[in-house]
Structures are given as structure tokens and as C-alpha cells.
Image: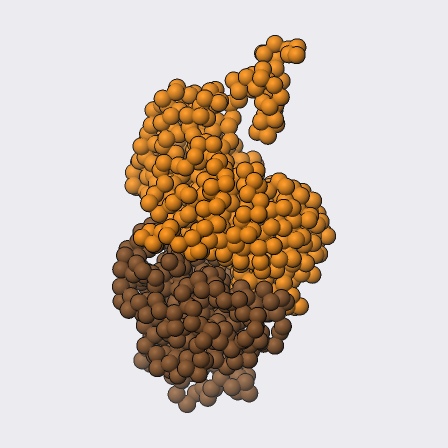
Amino acid sequence: MSPPLLGVEEEGQSNASLVASSGSMDCLSQSGSGLKERNYLGLSDCSSVDSSTITSLSKENKNNLNLKATELRLGLPGSQSPERDPDLALLKSGKLDEKLLFPLLPSKDGICASSQKTVVSGNKRGFSDTMNGFPEMKSSGYTEGNWIFHASGSESESPQSVGQGKFPSNSTINVMLSSRSSGAQPAAVNKEVPPKASQERPRATNGSSHNQITTNNNSSAPAAKAQVVGWPPIRSFRKNTLATTSKNNDELDGKLGPGALFIKVSMDGAPYLRKVDLRTYSTYQELSSALEKMFSCFTIGQCGSHGTPGREMLSESKLRDLLHGSEYVLTYEDKDGDWMLVGDVPWELFINSCKRLKIMKSSDAIGLGMCGFD
Amino acid sequence: MNYFPDEVLEHVFDFLTSHRDRNAVSLVCKSWFKVEKWSRHRVFVGNCYAISPERLIARFPRVRALTLKGKPHFADFNLVPHDWGGFVYPWIEAMAKSNIGLEELRLKRMVVSNEGLELLARSFVNFKSLVLISCEGFTTDGLAAVAANCRFLRELDLQENEVEDRKGQWLSCFPDSCTSLVSLNFACLKGEVNLTALERLVARCPNLKSLRLNRAVPLDALQRILMLAPQLEDLGTGSYVHDPDTETYNKLISTFQKCRSIRSMSGFLEVSPLCLPAIYPICSNLTSLNLSYAPGIHGDELIKLIHHCRKLQRLWILDCIGDKGLGVVASTCKELQELRVFPSDPFGVGNAAVTEKGLVAISFGCPKLHSLLYFCQQVTNAALITVAKNCPNFTRFRLCILDATKADPVTMQPLDEGFGAIVQSCKDLRRLSLSGLLTDRVFLYIGMYAEQLEMLSIAFAGDSDKGMLYVLNGCKKLRKLEIRDSPFGNEALLTDVGKYETMRSLWMSSCEVTLGGCKVLAEKMPRINVEIINEYDQMEFGFDDRQKVDKMFLYRTLVGPRKDAPHFVWTL
């Protein structure tokens, strides 16, 4: 029996963890002496796996496994779907497991090739998940498991002790399996686990981390963290509450919500509108510059700025001309539905009452501020 | 030998409030045992499976206030399956049957059912105080039963429970005759409440000192409630969202100015930062502030708020305050004793997080600090050594580096020396949680220096069995040890099995302990329950002693294996 058994959260874990495990596998095959191999997960063949074989296999399987893992995992609550069983079934055999793991580590080969760390396969779960999650360099060979990290630095640091090197690899392997287990058990009970796993989590703990993971995964590698069950150690109640609160804040679009304050910006003659987050600015000047950059493509022949530094001053003054001079006027609709000229009230009051922005042609703006606008 | 009549002894014992003192007293001689037994009203049971309700009642027949704790601590972090146990119903049932005059019940991490609450409400006429912390299994219907039937209810305190909200009228179930409420906390409820009923309840309870509202109570209702209860000392706001340009907000400002007694504030789950200035007048009197559920208050606004809180002794906050904000805390809150900094984005990529710099600033500015829970991106040994030097009074030190095995980012060394400095300097340290890159060395230090340590939490740390052995051998007062994902195995587990009878419990998950090792332990120690928690592989359970155990929880007990263990828990 090889129960990964972390009651694993399903989102996002597989990628990083798989990668992590494969990384450790690589290292295992590379490093020689000092290895203390533990056949916890039945991966008895790991030391005999040839890295080159792995690489080639990885290329074969890369797309399949990668995509599958990505599809199934990210952002889908309750994503422990039976579809994953075939993957997991493959994991039962030791040798095959490792090879499957490798595909997710395109860069790992290079990293592990230079690894001097001893690696022990064992039963540390989730550990490299945490490592994976954080875009920091780790010492002592922890980065073996981190596909996210640009881990080259770690290799040059000698481990504090042999034991240091040991630990992470253990976890990487197990992490892979534990992440798998969220969908089903690699060991035996594949079919039955998904329902059980879902029962184990009556609360929507995973929901919040889902949101996090999905957003994170849109950015660079560090964002695609694997989630270790129970780490960081925050009470589920707190996690759930904060997740709900953030969601609520996001929904308070344009209202007095504490989160982002996105409002529409329209420009006369532009084919489509834009949205800006007023909270990212603290002065009218910043807002002007941002709007200028956004709408420069629409001011035909007017604003020649392409965002290059040299031109900025020129375009800012042009914008000022545009906005406050001859061509255009920046106006906003306030809570009462009136169209007001931007710039009269203090910034804080402005973002409080502004519901949408409009860049009007000066010719249309005659009479603005004097009476209401339809 | 007994020179005093029992009544005198009993009177003397009344002055002993600590459980340990009373336990010690009852060991002196038979008559003292008897007197103490019949005069003990407050009983604390740290593990509900260490003793049975019947035996408790037999031992302390006059119990009036009972504290029970159920699930292991790591259940907070989803490491314990949902149905593991910790049911309170048998306790309520037994006490009801024996006509115990229960007045106070305080539960932590237990499963509470509506039936239990109903039985409680019906059975104990003088019931006064119900405190539920991190419990689950009940709905607002159960609360309605308590509200309706406990005529002398003084305290209903729900902290961070998972309560199914039936959107009912449980608040309306407090009868008009109920005027005794002193403390009402329903902040964890998610559903709507009857605002009229709430206001009328507040109006007729002149002794109400603590009121924590949930998200469904809007700001205008808060204003009206505060008008009715200017004597409040502890306030948890509901939804603190409003347009500051309104009459309501202005009324709130003047109302807050009348609430001169508020010493503790919390809430702000939803907040309009522009409305925060209304509480500035209160801030100067605050000794306790919990903004850990207020992600809507950004760093700058937090700092503005903190500037007003010069008397703060306890501060719970989110890490969006940043190191800079913690610097402001350090220079403003000189009386600070307890600080908790929670991550606003636990899985985020280092946004607005705090580092060791904030902690160091706090240590320089707040010498009275003795309790810390700190989630951060990174920590250096140098910082920890500085903190240890500045704050030798720590009794609780919990440091959680979000990246569980991160080394010192400056020296790339493990954090052994830093934590070593903490345990060496803080001689009264009772609770410690470790994180970061750690070798066996840190455990050597802990074993050597942490003489008062009672609870230790270990995750992703250590190299070998020696680590755990250092702790087991060195920490004489250790009561709770919880370990996850660390390379400790059978040798560490079995070297000193007698130790576990001196402790409340030991949790080991994802370690190197095997089933065989656990079996040996269980056989040697009949008064220890060794539970193996195996959610997934029940079929393959228990046939190979060499297999590693995923989750093991052992605890001392006087009543043998529990009878309510679910199928995935195997008591060896």
C-alpha cells in the first residue's frame, strides 16, 4: 500500500508536483553514492532509470500528460475526475511512473544533470509542492523538485548536510502521488477514491485556492504553485471567509468596494470602450497619462506616442492639449447621473463618485458643468 | 491529620482556580481528595477521548463548567478527515441523565449536532454560557433551541464555526424575558439575521458587553445598535460599507463618540475605507484589535488607523500592512503583547507580504511582546537572533514561512541558529511552531533549552530520528507534539514509549513511521490509543507492517479504544 494520503486538494497540484517528482527522479538517477533509497511508493526502479531514456519518453508523453494534467487540474473545483484514472493507473508501476513524471519538467534535465545532491525517494509528501510554489531560490538542492524555479543557483550551493538533500526528493515523489490521489489512488482503489475524496472535503476550502491558482497560473512560472494540503497552516474557516470576501469585493464593481474600482472609459469615435481601475492611480495626472496611453491609437494623427520614454513628455503635453485644450475633454458621470468635468474635486472624492469616464470632443462639451447632460 | 473541617478546606480550595493546582491538591490525601472532588466546579478535558463522560461525572459530580476539546490541532488544516470524531452529544446526554447542573460549556474542534444543542437547552435549567470554537455539525436551528430555552443565558459565543445557516429566525427565538445576555458573538454565521429582533434584543439586555455581528448587519443597523448599547466593551462590526457622504455616516460618527467603553474591535469583513475615520476616536482606547478578516483595508489605511491605537495590547492583522506598517506598529503600540500577522494571499506570489524586517522592527519597538503568530515570506537567522535578544518574554512563538522549507535568504543556511536563539533566550516559551529549512540541530537546541515547552509543531523539518529524540528526551513538560512531513521513524517513536503517557497527544503524518512500529507501541502501552487514519486504502489496511503510516494520532486515555471511531480510523 502506498497511500499518498494527504487528503490532497485537487487544484493545481499535479503540475508542479509531477514536475517535482520527475525532477527528483532525474536527480536520483544522476547522483550515485550516499543515496538512501526507500521504496515507499514502489518506485523501486528509480535508480536504474536512465535519464536519457527518460528524456526521450518525456518528449513523447509530454504533451499528453501535461495537457491532461493542466486540463483537469486548474481552476476546476471537484476536478478529481475519473478521466484521470488512466493516468493514475500508469503510475502503479514503478518505472513507468517516473517516466511519466518527467515530461512535466522540460528544464529539469539540465538542472538535475548538474545536481550533486543526494536524493532519497521516500514518503515525504507535499514538501516540494511548497517549494515549487515559491519563486525563491532554495539552498541545498531543494530546487530539485522545483520546475518553477530557475533553479540553477541552487545547484551551486552545497547542501548543509546530506540530510538536507534527502528530504526534498522524498517529498517530490510523494507529492506526485499525493496530488494524483486527489483524483484517485495510484495504488489500488482508483475508482473509489474520487467520491471519497470529495466526501473528505465538505467545505469549499478548495474553492478559494482554485481562484488563486487559476489567476496565478496565468502569470509566469512562479505562479503555478502546487498546493500542499494544510500548508500554509491557516484554518479553513479563515481561508474560506477571506476567499468569499475577496470575491465580494470584486463583485462590487464600481461601487464603494475596497477592491479594484473598474469603470468604463469611452471615447467619442472609438469603436470600443476600455476599462480602468481607478484605485491604481492616486492623482489626476496618473489617470491622464494612463488614458492617453490607452487611447492613443484612436487619436488619429494626433498622438504619436508609442509609449517610448523619449516621447512621453511630448505625448503628455499633447494629451493635456487633447484633454484640456482644443481637441478633447475628459468628463465623468457621477452618482447622480450628471456629466461633470474631471479635475474639479479632490481625487478621493472623485473616485468615490465617478461611475464612468468619457473622453468627449471639445465641440460636444460646450455647456458641460453648467447643466445636466442627457 | 485533618485539622480543618471540610467546609474550611472547601473554602480554601475555592481560591484555587488553576486546574493544575486543584489536581495537585487532590493528590495530597484522601480527605483532601474528597473535599476537592465535591467542590470542583470547573473541569478542563483537553482530549475528549482521554476520559468518558460517565467517569468524569463520577469523579466530579458537581461540575458546572466544562471545557472539551476534540479533534487534533492539525484538523484545522484539513489534515484530519471530516468524520474523525469528537462528538459532544454523549457528553451532553450523560450529564443530562445524571442531573448535572451544567452552566457553562466550552467546546473546541468538536462535532456539535442540533440534537445535542436541543438536549442541552432543555436539560440544564441554569445554563449560562455556550462557547463554540471551530466546531461544526449544527445549524441555526440548534441555536434557536438554545436561544428559546436557556432562560438565563449570558453568553453565546460562536468563533469560527462552520454553521449551516437556515436563514431562520433564531435571533427572534430569544424570548422577551431574556435580558441577561452579556456576550453575543455570531460573526461566523453567513446568513441574514432579523435586524429588528437583534435591535430589540440589544435594547433589553443592559449588561451586554460584547457583541460581534455578522456580515449581514449593515452599517445603519450598527449605528442604531450602538445607540442602544453604549456600554459595549467589545464590538465586532458587521458590514462596514457605506457612503461617507450621508446622514447615516455622520450619525455613526457621533454614536461612536459616545461609546467610550469599547476596548476591543473586530469584524470589517466588508469595509469602505473612507468610513474608517469614524472609529478613530475609539482607537485611542482600544487594547485589542482584530483586522485579520478585513482584506478590504489596504496598507495605507491600516497605517492611518494604527497611528491612533496607542494602547493596543493585542493586534491581529493581515500581512498587507507590510514591513513598513509593522514599523508603524512598533513605534506606536508600545504596550503590544500579542501580535498575529496572517497572510492575505496565502498562495500568492509575494504580494505586499511581510518579511523578517517587520518582525525585527516589532521586536525593537514592543518589548512586552510575548505571543506571536507570524506568516511571512522569509526569515533570516540574524533577524531571529535579534528578536530573541529584544523579546526574551515569548511564551508563544509561531513562525510560518509560507515557503515551508525556505532557508535564510541571505546566508542560505538553515534556520537552526535563529530558532535556537529563540528557545535559548525565551525561558518561558510554552508553545513553538517551526518552519523554514531546519536540520536536526534545531531540535538539539529545543531539547536543550526549551524547558517549559508544552506544545511543538513541526513541519518539513529535520534529517533523522535524532531530531525527534532530542525533543522527546529534552522537553520534560511537553504535552502536545505534532509533526508532519518530517523524516522521523520507528526508532524515534519507540525509543521512549513511556514518554507518551506524560503527554496529551502525538500526531505524526507523512513521516517515516511504519505500521509495525505503531503496533509495537500500541502493544507496549495499553493506556495509549494509537490511531491510524487511513482515508483511502481501507482494503489494504494492516497487512504489511513495513508500510509507512500516513497519519498516526496517539493519545493517552483511561478508557481504551473509542467506540465511535469511523471505518477509516484503526485503533491498534
Chain drawn in brown = A
On the image, the x and y values in percent for residue B262 come to 55, 38
The quadrant of the rendering that contains the N terminus of chain B is top right
Query: Residue A255, how many percent across, how many down?
Result: 39, 59
Position of residue B490 measured from the top left corner of the image (x, y, whole percent): 52, 52
Looking at the rendering, which quadrant does residue A360 occupy?
Answer: bottom left
Residue A207 in picture, x, y percent from top left: 36, 58
> Residue, x 50% and y 73% (percent of image)?
A28
Q: Quadrant of residue B49?
A: top left
* In front of the other: B300 or B553: B553
Q: How many marks?
A: 0
Residue lying at 54% horizontally and 69% vertically, measured from the top left: A35
The quadrant of the picture occupied by the C terminus of chain B is top left
Up-down: is A56 above or below B28?
below
In the rendered image of the structure, the colour used to display chain B is: orange
Q: Residue reaching furthest bottom?
A: A301
Residue A69 visible in the displayed image: yes
B506 over A196 or under it: above or below: above
User: In the rendered view, would you say B39 is above or below B117?
Assistant: above
Q: Is residue B248 visible?
A: no
Lateral position of residue B49 relative to residue B398, left or right: left
Q: Is residue B560 above or below residue A208?
A: above
The residue sitting at 36% across, 73% down in the picture is A96
Choose between B501 and B18: the one closer to the eye: B501
Q: Quick check: B242 left or right of B446?
A: left
Left or right of residue A12: residue B449: right
* Rendered residue at 59%/62% (across/down): B437
